[in-house]
Amino acid sequence: MSPWRLNRSALGLASALFLAAATASAAEDGPAPASKSHSSSHPGDHAPIGVMGDHLHEKGEVMLSYRYMRMRMDGNRDGTNDLTIAEILDPAGENFPVTPTDMDMQMHMLGIMYAPTDRLTLMGMIPYIKFEMDHETRMGTRFTTESEGVGDVKLTALYGLFRDELHGVHLNAGVSVPSGSINERDETPMGRVRLPYPMQTGSGTWDLLPGLTYTGQADWLSWGAQALGTIRLGRNDLSYRLGHRYDLTAWGAVSPLSFASFGLRLHWEDFADISGDDDGLNPAMVPTADPNRRGGERLNGGVSMNLLAPESWPVVGGHRLAIESLWPLYQSLDGPQLEVDWNVIVGWQAAF
Ligand SMILES: [Cu+2]
């Protein structure tokens, strides 16, 4: 099946809702607390690149962005205890005939932001995701499954609630469109089958993405915090829904140079198990096919750098280049489940 298959009616409806929200808000544009001016931009104006929807734009401004993300998972755990491959396969242990051993996730994400007013910025993000998972069976066979395609498109309205010289607060009101796939298949020792939940590129449900963001800046210091939810609505076409998730993050950065800032971040993520199940999967075969072994919580620590090209530079003046790396400091998983080892995010942003 084509990785570019998109649910057109879903996309159309989401676009219409998005435009309606934009039009409604444009009409009520009063003496709003203005967002920060890009004419005096600063590398620490933006959060570490792994944070989305952290800033507003000035009326009429458009920003394009591209992010490349990679996540590496190696080894399994249950709770906070590491499990060996042998323990997962052992009939006297966890008793699964097959187990994942490691996984790579790569994501390319295109983003666009547009501010119809100083108070309102609209943001759209389109991910293209590639998964690779390695497995081992009780018979000693190793095999790899792969899937790739467009993920769930996210449309978010960022609405300024407050801003002064020092700091500001805005609302994140988003929706995740089920444009990704829940029917990715690949060859396995059991034949060509539908892949388990973590290999699917979409949730299959419309999801609400509510959130609140706080940012501050004083001279060469900047900081911020964001709370985001992912609330799944209903069930998908295979009669399950992924678990709701909650993300809390806080960061601080110093900008010792006019073109560079260096940041530290903490990110707490809490993700629940799946409700319902995909009838095509056998939860006794491999842990990834069990809807009750998908939840967990994780605290990540991140180190980041934002670079801002001087306005005087031709073509790339004002463009941003950023990198962030995150490592789990703590993770407790409903296992056996693959544990995260590290994440890297590289991004480019330019406003017009
Ligand atoms: Cu932007």
Image: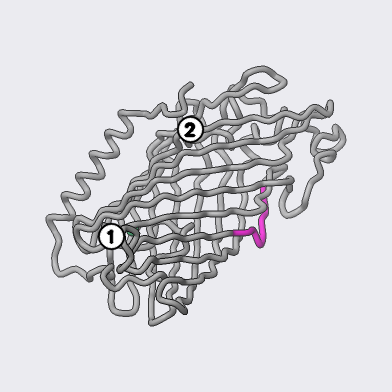
Q: Which residues are magenta?
A: 326-333
- The label shown at residue 149 is 2
User: In the image, residue 169 lies at what x, y percent?
Assistant: 34, 68
Mark 1 neighbour class, 10 Å CA radius: few under 14, some 14 to 19, many 20 or more: many
The residue at 28%/64% (across/down) is 160
Image color mode:
one colour
What residue type is disc 2 on?
Answer: Gly
Q: Is residue 329 magenta?
A: yes
Q: Nearer the viewer, residue 250 or 58?
A: 58
> Disc 1 to disc 2, how far (Cα)?
31 Å
Residue 231 spot, x, y in % from top left: 44, 46
Q: Quadrant of residue 189?
A: top right
Q: Residue at x 13, y 65 (%)?
A: 30
- Residue 290 relative to residue 68: left or right: right
Position of residue 320 relative to residue 15, above or below, is: below
**Amino acid on which the number 1 mark rests in the picture:** Tyr
